[in-house]
Image: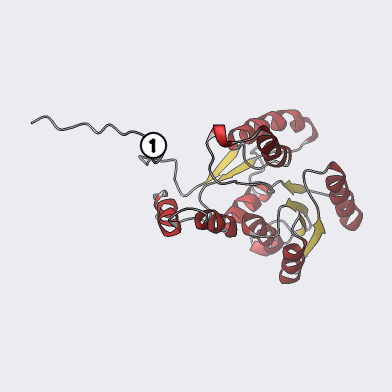
Amino acid sequence: MAAGARYAGKVVVVTGGARGIGAGIVKAFVDSGAQVVFCDKDELGGRALEKDIPGSVFIPCDVTQEGDLQTLVSETIFRFGHLDCVVNNAGSHPPAQWPEETSIHGFRQLLELNLLAIYTLTKGAVTAMTKAFALDESQYGVRINCISPGNIWTPLWEELAASTPDPSATIQEGTLAQPLGRMGQPDEVGAAAVFLASEATFCTGLELLVTGGAELGYGRKASPGTPVAIPTLTP
């Protein structure tokens, strides 16, 4: 099937679509023939992407605000008459913190964005919600799946690396975490999203790992600073 016909005539909403993985998903669906409406709090970035990708429509939206989400959906249906697929991509990945360093307010904000907007508790909670919603919504013919991306090279990953004491070492460690020896790209996550929407028609409640195999085999599990007891060889 030609790439431009895989999802032709369909209407897709993508949240958090102005950059990174979200932008990759927007482009992948447009390339598949879909009409794509995407939202983001970053209006400048959203308008710029809208110009770069003909066939996309940008609507400013804060996914933690119910009124904004209602406007997003109603405007989409007003423009195109129907809605076939929603990709809940918006989310946040704050720098690593110890539990005792995390405020209750900050944790609640993260839950509100990543769980209610659906992205990653966060990933374990999203997977559980995906399975529960898949059961609930199957009676309406609605399929619900989720993608769990691993290390994807995005502006957010770059910003997080820059905030560490040794950005180059952080990037190297992130790269070597995959057996494939590289990080993923946003368009690879986009391709997975299009697959789930257009071709995985007998899949619901599925968690699709887009990780380059990071969860396979051995890897560094102890956090830096953890006391390590290395066994010695018997003479």
Residue shown at the point (75%, 47%) measured from the top left = 86
Image vertical order of residue 108 relative to residue 189, above or below:
above
- Residue 7 figure quarter: bottom right
Q: Is residue 29 visible?
A: yes
Q: Nearer the viewer, residue 148 or 137?
A: 148
Left or right side of 139 for 151: left
Say which quadrant the N terminus sits in.
Answer: bottom right
| Image side of residue 213 versus residue 80, left or right | left
Q: Secondary structure at mark 1?
A: loop
Measured as percent of width and height from the top left, residue 27 is found at 67, 62
Q: Is residue 178 above or below residue 55?
A: above
Q: Amino acid at mark 1?
A: Ala
Asked if 8 appears above or below 113 in the picture, the reply is below
Color style of the picture: secondary structure
Q: Residue at x 73, y 68 (%)?
A: 48
Whether residue 205 is visible here, answered yes or no, is no
Give the quadrant of the C terminus: top left
Q: Residue furthest right?
A: 78
* Location of mark 1 (residue): 222
Q: Viewer-proximal residue, 97 or 27?
A: 97
x then y, percent, for residue 77:
88, 51
10 Å neighbourhood of mark 1: few (<14), some, or many (≥20)? few
Residue at x-position 77% and y-position 36%: 141
Position of 75 with respect to 17 (left or right) is: right
| Residue 125 coordinates in the image, percent (x, y) | 63, 32
Foreground pick, 222 / 80: 222
Rendering coords of residue 148 (x, y %): 57, 43
